Image: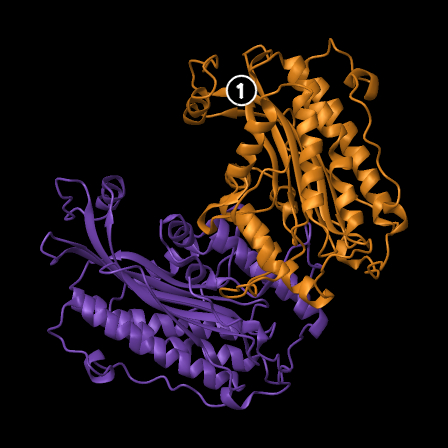
Chain colours: A purple, B orange
Amino acid sequence: MPFQPILNDSPILDEPESVPEGLKYDVPLLEFGSVYDIVPGLRKDMPMKEKMEILLKFYQLEIIQAIERADSSGNSFIIDEWSRGEGLGGGITRVFQDGRVFEKGGVNFSAIYGTLPRAAAQRMKANHKDLQIPENGNLPFYACGLSLVIHPRHYLAPSVHMNYRYFETRNADGTPQSWWFGGGQDLSPMYYNEADAVHFHKVLKDVCDHHDPTYYERFKKWADDYFLIKYRGEARGVGGIFFDDLNENEAEEHFQFVADALSRFLPSYLPAVRRAYEPSDEPRPTPEEGKHWQGLRRGRYVEFNLAVDRGTSFGLQTPGSRVESILMTLPKNASWEYNYQPKPGSLEAKTVEVLKNPKDYV
Amino acid sequence: MPFQPILNDSPILDEPESVPEGLKYDVPLLEFGSVYDIVPGLRKDMPMKEKMEILLKFYQLEIIQAIERADSSGNSFIIDEWSRGEGLGGGITRVFQDGRVFEKGGVNFSAIYGTLPRAAAQRMKANHKDLQIPENGNLPFYACGLSLVIHPRHYLAPSVHMNYRYFETRNADGTPQSWWFGGGQDLSPMYYNEADAVHFHKVLKDVCDHHDPTYYERFKKWADDYFLIKYRGEARGVGGIFFDDLNENEAEEHFQFVADALSRFLPSYLPAVRRAYEPSDEPRPTPEEGKHWQGLRRGRYVEFNLAVDRGTSFGLQTPGSRVESILMTLPKNASWEYNYQPKPGSLEAKTVEVLKNPKDYV
């Protein structure tokens, strides 16, 4: 791994006390449109892997620019391009740290060519009857995805995760054989705020409903099941959507669905960050209480990512995986205290109550 | 779970700048002796489970008292006794937080009665040919253990982990059938200090050699393999010893081995904590560098415990397990920075060098 710039040498700026300049401007929630009108360079007749790469790289840049602007500090994402070797693919890791509004975050693109051993291929076949395993047992595959995690500095601003990906198995001649889409996004507030959760879910429901009336209910439930710290019976946040193995409709339809979700990621999330800096009549923690609780909630985030998340665990166990790109999801700071119980009736206790009892928001 | 005292309400005292009073007195490294002469209430003719419980509870108290004295703050371990229900066992969790010398730690005793499903029992049979699985497939077992993790505040003082345990399967009438011992201890410095590592290993080698000339080499290697963050190719610390399924000699012999290891835990570790406060001619980090690096090393400790350690993962996945007792091993604070690389030639870089290349210390 090449020597990297040490991110924490950047000066730590004071956190703003009112809405930061760059957060004042809404990212508009546009009408749904054809992805081919929105994303430059895309053509319908391209192979799906090429279309996905163009789509994901387009939104990687769009999101990065919006986060940098919202941060209002002049700090920028570093670029870290990496390769797994000739013909094996690689990625573009973009990482942000020590901003004014955002403490740590990453927006990573990757596109990987590899071969699955027979046992892994056979497990996949359980969900993909059409999947053909070659006689030698090794299944060539291609996978690309865009992964994002953002941890803001303010204890009233939620962390967010988003991931959209495409997977295909390949014939000996390199043409795609079986394929599917996966992804989702979820919101993790330190302090539960109903307006933020409702808005996030409403944007996701609109995207889902625009494509299939069954999506939102199914994918919301899937997120509640997936983003759960099972051994604590506590969700990582207020959920969102999650789906995998999606190939029930035409690939083109699923592609447009993913494109629509990506196009609405920023307006689903940024308003919740701005709200942290806006005056409010609602009860709020003191900064001391807020920072302390934020540390403990980030401990839970770390627990989910390291001890529960199948995606992280699969990634870390894959030989040759890029550990730093996988673990860019971890917050800058996290803390643990033995059996910490919030005071009954406190804002912290109310948040835990919601995390232990997932709700319907729309 | 009953409401617990909120530990972090205790006042945070300044860290001492010279050797704290309570750390000045050595815990003596006594001659090896018969456990029956050392531990009150033990009789040779008791069933092994009873002997282990007396032994482990004796050292739980001894260690707690020594840690409290060394902390020099008057802070004490809280007691949290818990039960899994009538006839299912329970434990005594003892936790320490926010002392002057020690930031967070726990010393937990547990003794559990349970039943293993057939699949788990069959996996165990691989290492225990004599194990008899009942016709109904459910294997009654008993397990007890003492687990310890200590995270000092000073960045020059290493964290330490220790665990000794006894496991037996049981016949329908409650008598033991197959049995074995397991355990070990390992040291995790933030900054590599050769004297500390050599001393720790030397004490362990003495204990091992007193019982079997092959133990130290085998168990040191086992620790190097076990306490490894595989996906980073980096050890959690400078190792120590680790063993499991130990039943190659008489149970009585193994019992005395575990007793000797427990009797030397304090003198194996406390001198390294004192050394952090002693003047030295060797190069040392500034407090700012030290605290920063300590946070990152604690992030690695969290990674090992949550993403790698089979013991933690088994515990968290066991229905009805006591999550807070299992996760008392986590440090109070941990941090992550994207692809942080210490400056070449720095004390931090030298430490990573050792962690990536396990050495022989004695």
Which residue carries the number 1 mark? Answer: B140
Quadrant of residue A91 in the image?
Answer: bottom left
Secondary structure beneath disc 1?
Answer: strand
Q: Is residue A293 left or right of residue B338?
A: right
Q: Residue at x 78, y 16 (%)?
A: B34
Camera-side residue of A70 and B223: B223
Furthest residue toward front: B281
Q: Is residue B237 left or right of residue A129?
A: right
* B185 vs B329, nearest the viewer: B185
Q: What amino acid is at disc 1?
A: Pro
Residue A59 image offset from top left, x and y in percent: 33, 77
Using the rendered image of the protein, determine whether residue B3 is visible from the camera's viewpoint: no
User: Where does residue A164 sit, x and y in percent of width and height?
Assistant: 32, 65
Q: Nearer the viewer, residue B152 or B104?
A: B152
Query: Which picture quadrant has residue A31?
Result: bottom left
Tell me what residue is drawn at x 78 percent, y 42 percent.
B270
